[in-house]
Image (tube, helix red, strand yellow):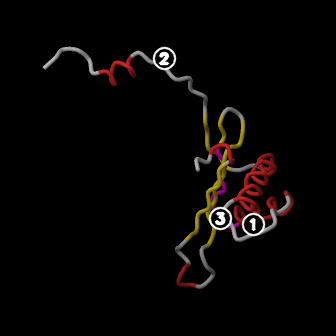
Amino acid sequence: MSDSVPEAESKFAMSPPLLTVSSAIWPCEEDDVASITAIYGHHVLHGLASFEIVPPSESDMRQRRLEIIGQGFPYLVADHAGDVVGYAYASPYRLRPAYRYTVENSVYLHAAWVVA
């Protein structure tokens, strides 16, 4: 056995530390609606997760958010370096009584944060 450090380990040991930028998740506020509208609009036009074909307006997204939080469900945004880079929420899965303890979650990321 050699006492030398393997090449892969030495390469990482010599790398400069990565810069870190603060990220946070918090409840979606009124000021975040424009950002989440843009994020969702991209997914409506270019993604496969939404069954909508026309992106909803900011007013529509504002109303949807209010309906969800009005029922006591979480509606969150992810911030990175001062920009909203994603959002998520939970909502009732189905209205039938058998599903009363079941929720559906939705998560959308800004296009720049999606790896294809």
Magenta segment: 71-78
**Crowd class of label 2 (few under 14; some 14 to 19; many from 20; radius 10 Å):** few
The residue that disc 3 covers is: 48
Q: Which residue is mark 1?
A: 67
Label 1 crowd bin: few (<14), some (14–19), many (20+), radius 10 Å? few
Q: Height in image: 59 above or below 52?
A: above
The quarter holding residue 73 reads: bottom right
The amino acid pointed to by label 3 is: Leu
Alpha carbons under labels 2 and 1: distance apart: 47 Å
Mark 2 or mark 1: which comes first in sequence?
Answer: 2
- The answer to whether residue 17 is left or right of residue 62 is left
Question: Percent position (x, y) of residue 79?
Answer: 66, 40
Q: Is residue 30 above or below residue 65?
A: above
On whether residue 77 falls in the magenta region, the answer is yes
Q: Residue type at mark 1?
A: Glu
Judge the density around disc 3: few (<14), some (14-19), many (≥20) Cα neighbours within 10 Å.
few
Q: CA distance from mark 1 to mark 3?
A: 24 Å
Number of numbered discs? 3
Residue sitting at x 85%, y 57%:
58
| Residue that numbered label 2 is attached to | 16
Q: Nearer the viewer, residue 43 or 34?
A: 43
Tell whether label 3 touches label 1 (CB within 8 Å).
no
Left or right of 92? Residue 28 is right
Mark 2 element type: loop
Q: Nearer the viewer, residue 94 or 11?
A: 11
Residue 59 within the magenta-colored segment of the rendering: no
x then y, percent, for residue 25: 62, 44
Cα separation between marks 2 and 3: 39 Å
| Residue 57 image-quadrant placement | bottom right
